[in-house]
Image (spheres, coloured by chain):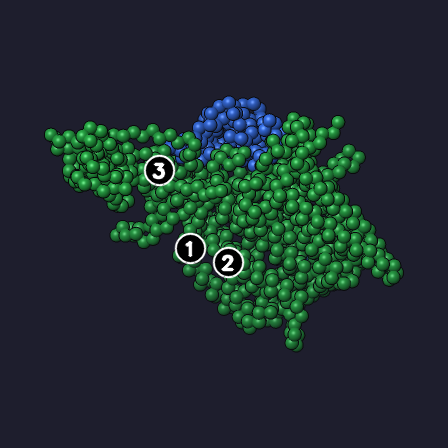
Chain colours: A green, B blue
Amino acid sequence: METKYIGEHLLPGELGHFFVLLAFVASIVSTVSYFLATRSRDAINGSSWKKMARVAFFIQVISVFAVFGTLYYIISNHFFEYHYAWEHSSRALPVRYLLACFWEGQEGSFLLWTVWHCVLGTILIRTAGEWENPVMTVISFAQVCLASMLLGIYFFGYKAGSSPFTLLRNDMAGAPIFSDPAYLQKYIQDGNGLNPLLQNYWMVIHPPILFLGFASTIVPFSFAFAGLWKKNFTGWVKPALPWCLFSGMVLATGVMMGAAWAYESLNFGGYWAWDPVENSSMVPWLCIIAGIHTAVIFKHTGHSLKACFFFFITAFILVLYSTFLTRSGILGTTSVHAFTDLGMSGQLLIYLFVFLIPAYTLLIAYQRQIPTVKKEEALDSREFWMFIGSLVLIISAIFILVITSIPVWNKILGSHFAEPVHRRFAYNRIEVFIAIILALGIAMVQYLKFGSTPGGYFRKNILLPTAVSLVIGLLILLFGKIHYDTFGNGFLAALIVMMFASVYAIVANFSYILFMIKGKMRSAGPSVAHAGFGLMLLGILISSSRKEVISHDPMGLLTGVFPADSKENSRNNILLYRNLPMQMADYEVTYLGDSISTPDGKHYYKIHYIRRDTATGKVIEKFNLYPNAFINPKGQQGLISSPASKHYWTHDIYTYLTSVNDPSKIQDTSQYYPHLVKVGDTIFFSNGYMRLDGLDTHPVSPHYQAQPGDIAVGAKLTVYSSDSDIFKVLPIYVLRDSAYENIIPDTLSQLGLFIRFDKILPEQRKIELSIRQSGEQNDWVVLKAYVFHYISLLWLGTILMIIGFAMSIYKKIVPKKQNPVKPIL
Amino acid sequence: MKKSNIVLLVLIAVTIAVIISMVGDFSTYETFASAARQPGKDFHVIGMLDKTRSLVYDPVKDPNYFSFYVKDKAGELEKVVYRGAIPTDFEKSDKIVLVGKMDGQQFECSSILMKCPSKYKANRKAESQQLDSKL
């Protein structure tokens, strides 16, 4: 007999599932119709197919948005009978993170991707003109693939996709709780919630931007494919170019947002770790950028068309490949961003080949028909060196891809390679040369002209920026403190060359804007983007090579347990007891206590930094940092901590906790120690002392209400802490009705002090004070602190580069009003 | 032959040379025994955390000393020392990838990569256990 379950909301799930199916079917109809419209020779027939295709595509768009809305409705109403809501959200989750848990899961992120395709497709239908039919065939087909990822339907025993609308009781069929019709009320009151690490505003904005970047790579791909398909080998470049720039801009924004997220709120200790997940998002970007450069070469000279086809096709294939890498579970042993296999890797692989095979087959088949320029590029032409630059970008991409794909090689070859032991250095030692070549190219190539450059033109114009860069580079060399010799002097030399080259790239591009195009901002997009990229290189170079650990553990240094040559193991964690200052580089650092911020259960730890003048000891600056952490969050043990940074223009002080004393395990074992003192005596405690100033026979204290018949004496104490803070305390001894002793202690929470006035010993003219100091030994944190120098250059460069992209797109899509001038780049 | 083709060939040759030289850098997944044969050299070792033995991390004594026991693929049990703080959720992990070297009777590791399915995605088994535990 069918169990009748109580309290379930089945309608939204059924609606959602219906719309997934509708989107799937409509996108098939749209693909077929667009395909037939493209093939049709007869104008009337073609236009009726096109009409049908458009209608189907719009039905698909509406369905996809309906799916999105339904899933959001389920999550925001906490319908935990749905597996997706139960797994990713909880009642306590702030509303602003509901979207974050929407795309935490595999299904939600595919949904996000398909939503962006809808948006891009709608814009293309309005703007692509004659290219609409073939381009939209490809995009509609991609929509078929993505919709099938959300189906969760069995075809011949193979499960296609995974539906976000699966009910918990169907997904976990067999679990005993589902034999109870009221399981929802009894056992499933709350969901698992969003991983605390992801409860962050970056998680709300980073995935949509990154997925827009990924989704947008299909547009250049579709144009290139359409060019091959329609054998219109040259016409597609111009309409595709703004899209390529858009793709480059958004993908760069998405990737760098990920870097900023890692830097700001994850405790990876930096912004880039060459993790496979990071790499696989950067490689398609490199390919897109190479494609943009070859497209520009083609537009101006007719050269490089084949390369242009190849790069735009490959960029999208690389996006599919990186989706496969990160979501198939194959990176299990190399990445910290562990995605486990959801059983969809086969399907992902099929999609990779479904796009890869036709595109490359057509490219190879029509290879000879793609027009080429017979005349060779001259050595003093801009196009020759731009082409070299594109090749260098691709070489960098291939290199990163080969190492990142080690787990794939192992799978194919049956080998057992592991990635290089010093991962960062393995990448950096090659990439530093790539960066040098690129930076030099960025600086110099724009001073060449397309075709050939008249004698003296190049020399005359490049002289000033070269001289200025050399001077600035020398100044940085002298005062910039770049002496990173961990991996030897050869690498240091390469870094210094890279520094000069990056400075050159920045200066030469600004000088190009000022003197070559005379500040005409309409044409300045490429130079702004290139200067931004140069600034990023400089920021990466300085912040990474001068990254300093300041939380060296003095205990380790004293015992010498740890030899200085073991660099990767240097003792970088420091233990701070509450209120006990420690010296870290220039800073005197004190942990002052923690506070819990409701309602999310996050603890904020107050870390006080003081910098003193070394000669006079005068305080130059002081500030507090509040690194925070979740302790034992739901379903996890230990600490999930986020850093806090003090930002300066020239550097960041970056602090995060690596361990805290578990508050549930703290037991206050401290006890009172008696001290016999007379007026004027001092008593020492762990981080200061107190002095008995005198006795007060009419004590006034908020803790004490005088009553008639009381004999009350207060002990006036002045407490001097080692931080040279001064406090007054007044413990009181009361003899009520000549018999009953009443002791009113005083406390000093800042120092964890409890002071009792226990006895008066008149004959010795002494009193007995009992003192207990708690907390200090029980309350501690272990933290790590870094200084990142000039990291602001990296963020500034990123923003500049994105602005440069936007300026270039503007120039391409907004026609010039006045008389046309010769376009530059 | 066109200049760009020559450049292309040269660049391809350089790429291949670099990648081949990189392959020499690739380490392989080793066991404690094979790592012990070349002391002082860094290796990747995959193993399982032995949860029956205690994890030692006492920050009050030393915030940069963490030790635990791992059983490698060959079934050999070794003490592993990590000079740093205990990573989050360490107790829950089972499969562990260590990078480091054998030093006498212990494995000095410089980085730990944990595979805990619960980190980003709960796995089915853990989920159904969790549902069962609600009863």
Please tell me whether residue A738 is drawn above or below residue A409 in the rendered image: above
Answer with the quarter of the image where residue A334 lies.
top right
Q: Which mark is residue B43?
A: none
Q: Residue at x 49, y 42 (%)?
A: A599
> The residue tagged with tag 2: helix, strand or loop?
helix
Question: Closer to us: mark 2 or mark 3?
Answer: 3
Q: Position of residue B74 (x, y in %)?
A: 57, 24
Answer with the quarter of the image where residue A817 lies.
bottom right
The verdict on a common chain for dots 2 and 1 is yes
Q: Position of residue A206 (x, y in %)?
A: 58, 50
Q: Which quarter of the rendering shows the N terminus of chain A? A: top right
Question: Closer to us: mark 1 or mark 3?
Answer: 3
Q: Name the amino acid type tagged 3.
A: Tyr
> The residue tagged with tag 1: helix, strand or loop?
loop
Please tell me whether residue A487 is drawn above or below residue A341 in the rendered image: below
Q: Position of residue A9 (x, y in %)?
A: 68, 39
Q: Which mark is residue A796?
A: 2
Specify which label sits upstream in the sequence, 1 or 3. 3
Query: Which residue sits furthest front?
Result: A708
Q: Which residue is mark 3?
A: A577
Q: Residue at x 68, y 61 (%)?
A: A241
Specify which label sits upstream in the sequence, 2 or 1. 1
Q: Which residue is mark 1?
A: A648
Number of labels in the image equals: 3
Q: Residue at x 68, y 46 (%)?
A: A70
* Residue A766 horizontal side relative to residue A418, left or right: left
The verdict on a common chain for dots 1 and 3 is yes
> The residue tagged with tag 3: helix, strand or loop?
strand
Q: Label 2: chain?
A: A
Rounded to the nearest angstrom, the CA distance separating label 1 from label 3 is 27 Å
Q: Name the amino acid type tagged 2.
A: Leu
Q: Name the amino acid type tagged 1.
A: Tyr
